[in-house]
Image: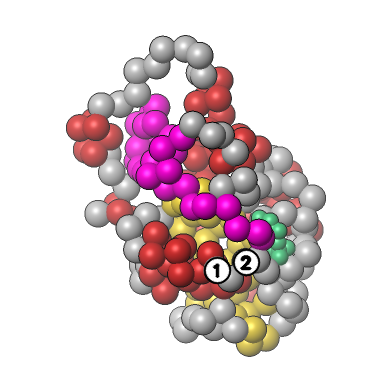
Amino acid sequence: MSTGIRAQIAALGASLFHRKLTFGRTGNLSVRHGELILVTPTGASLGDLDPDALAVIDADGRHVDGPRPSKEAFLHAAVYRARPGAGAVVHLHSTHAVAVSCLADVDPADVLPPLTAYYAMRVGTLPLLPYHAPGDPALGPLAEDTARRHHAMLLANHGPVVAGADLAAAADAVEELEETARLHLLLRGHATRPLTPEQAAALRPAETR
Ligand SMILES: O=C(O)[C@@H](O)C(=O)COP(=O)(O)O
Ligand SMILES: [Zn+2]
């Protein structure tokens, strides 16, 4: 499968890891290539991916080739099935988004307010999916259903999962999500003035139109 895509996955993994957007051996990345999906192997550090050692799965999440895929491969496959326009999926344990995923007083239909235009453009709405242990396939149907309406979702007590037309778009969105989570926590206890529903709707991400 394309060496260019493999190199892009490794380069993005290193960039995310070195900017501390995920830690240790957390997070996973995937890219759709025709009928198949290239996904990071389980137990790998995103900071040290070998482009020649990525797993290949099919649309049902079944292992086709390469090393053992991420334990979230079923989740990536579910998002691709729900979103025919998605070309890449990114899952991270980015600190502020994880912190927000642990808050008790959030609206599970939309966890973060549209504090900035870029958040409204790149993320839009962010549903919270109930806690499941990492790799629990029971999350698959729920993620698939949610992904039909949302390209970004937050796994409770875990982290974000974001789809994009390509890796760059998915990375832009997950980075914006992380920065907005950080702003949201910085602003807790302060009166804030998010975008109005009309202002946010006018900037709704193309992925959700
Ligand atoms: O949180 C987890 O365990 C996974 O969601 C994760 O981030 C890393 O798992 P692998 O992709 O199986 O290494
Ligand atoms: Zn995870």
Give neighbour class at mark 1: few <14, some 14-19, many 20+ (Cα, 10 Å). few
Q: In the picture, which quadrant includes the C terminus?
A: bottom left
Give ligand 1's quarter of the image.
bottom right
Q: Quadrant of residue 43?
A: bottom right
Please tell me how many numbered marks the rendered image carries: 2
Look at mark 1 in the image and give the residue it sits on: 138
Using the image, determine if residue 184 lies above or below residue 88.
above
Q: Position of residue 15 (x, y in %)?
A: 67, 48
Say which amino acid is labelled 2.
Asp
Q: Is residue 65 left or right of residue 138?
A: right
Q: Establish whether ligand 1 lies closer than 8 Å to the Cβ of label 1.
A: no
Q: Position of residue 33 (x, y in %)?
A: 50, 77
Q: Quadrant of residue 100?
A: top right
How much space separates mark 2 and mark 1, taking CA atoms? 5 Å
What is the secondary structure assignment of the residue under circle 2?
loop
**15 or 129, which is in the foreground?**
129
Magenta-tinted stretch: 106-134
Q: Are marks 2 and 1 in contact (CB under 8 Å)?
A: yes
